[in-house]
Amino acid sequence: MGFGVDIGGSGIKGALVDLSTGRLHGERLKIPTPHPATPDAVADVVAEIVETFDWQGPIGITVPGVVKGGITHTAANIDPAWVGVDADELFARRLGRDPDDVGVLNDADAAGIAEVRFGEERFGRGVVLLLTFGTGIGSALFVDGQLVPNTEFGHIEVDGHDGESRAAASAKDNEGLSYPDWARRVNRYLSVLENLVWPDLIIVGGGVSRKAEKWVPLLQIRTPITVATRQNQAGIIGAAAAVAEGIAH
Ligand code: BGC
């Protein structure tokens, strides 16, 4: 068993994770993200979630930014106060745990770990790119199942714009785009990206992947595309797996 917490723009979610199946064990608890989502305010919510469960083992926590050695380095869609924070130390202190028992990693990297470990067998072969479409666009790159951490492909420049500003799911919602109109933007974004990375497979995830039938069939790119198996639970599952594997430090 493991435990994962996924920090997102609208909600912070935590659950026990069965690490033999890569499925949630029991109910997931979701609490709205505080505003402003400063490190201390978020840590309070993370503690509230963890304390609800009877769990003393390692805890994996995702952050929607670059995380290296437990330090958060970017904050594209979260409070700027996160830049330079020792998130590992912050959460460990707030949770009353040993820093070795807390692992912090990028949200998309966590989602990718969930898919590669527990999704389809082919996800573990070759160059595989997972993209999460949400408030921003997150990316996780794998070579034969091995993560290349902290790729930030949501921010590649597409037609003079930050990629995620036009192709994230939030752009669809904020601009009231239909699925076909938004799919055209995603298609343009993916065609620029696939020319830079040349993956063997792209896995699309994030909450909007639950409605995959409305947009994924409209995409016409060179790279084979498939839909994430764990959708928006992947962050929780991957965070728990990453800390158990010792790759989230
Ligand atoms: C951030 C990434 C994050 C992604 C999804 C982007 O804006 O730069 O680090 O993975 O959003 O949350």
Image: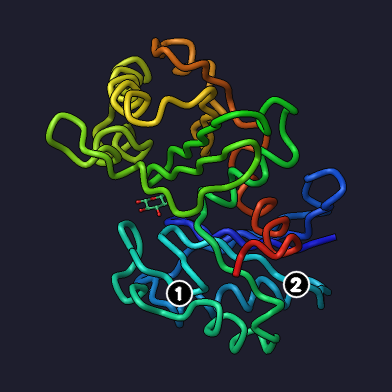
Q: Nearer the viewer, residue 204 or 48?
A: 204
**Total number of numbered discs in the rendering:** 2
Which of marks 2 and 1 precedes in the sequence?
A: 2
Q: Which mark identifies residue 154?
A: none
Q: Nearer the viewer, residue 68 or 182?
A: 68
Q: Which mark identifies residue 71?
A: 1
Pointer 2 residue: 58
Q: CA distance from mark 1 to mark 2?
A: 18 Å
- Label 1 or label 2, whichever lies nearer to me, is 1
Amino acid on which the number 2 mark rests in the picture: Pro
- Residue at the image point whose x is 79% and y is 45% from the top: 23
Side of 36 relative to 129 (left or right): left
Q: Nearer the viewer, residue 71 or 165?
A: 71
Amino acid on which the number 1 mark rests in the picture: Ile
- Location of residue 72 in the rendering, given as x and y in whole percent from the top left corner: 42, 70
Side of 124 relative to 177 (left or right): right
- Location of residue 32 in the rendering, given as x and y in whole percent from the top left corner: 50, 62
Q: Residues within 10 Å of mark 2 (few under 14, many from 20)?
A: many
- Residue at the image point whose x is 61% and y is 59% from the top: 13
Relative vertical location of residue 130 with respect to residue 120 in this rendering, above or below: below
**Of all residues shown, which one is farthest toward the left?**
160
- Residue at the image point whose x is 75% and y is 39% from the top: 118
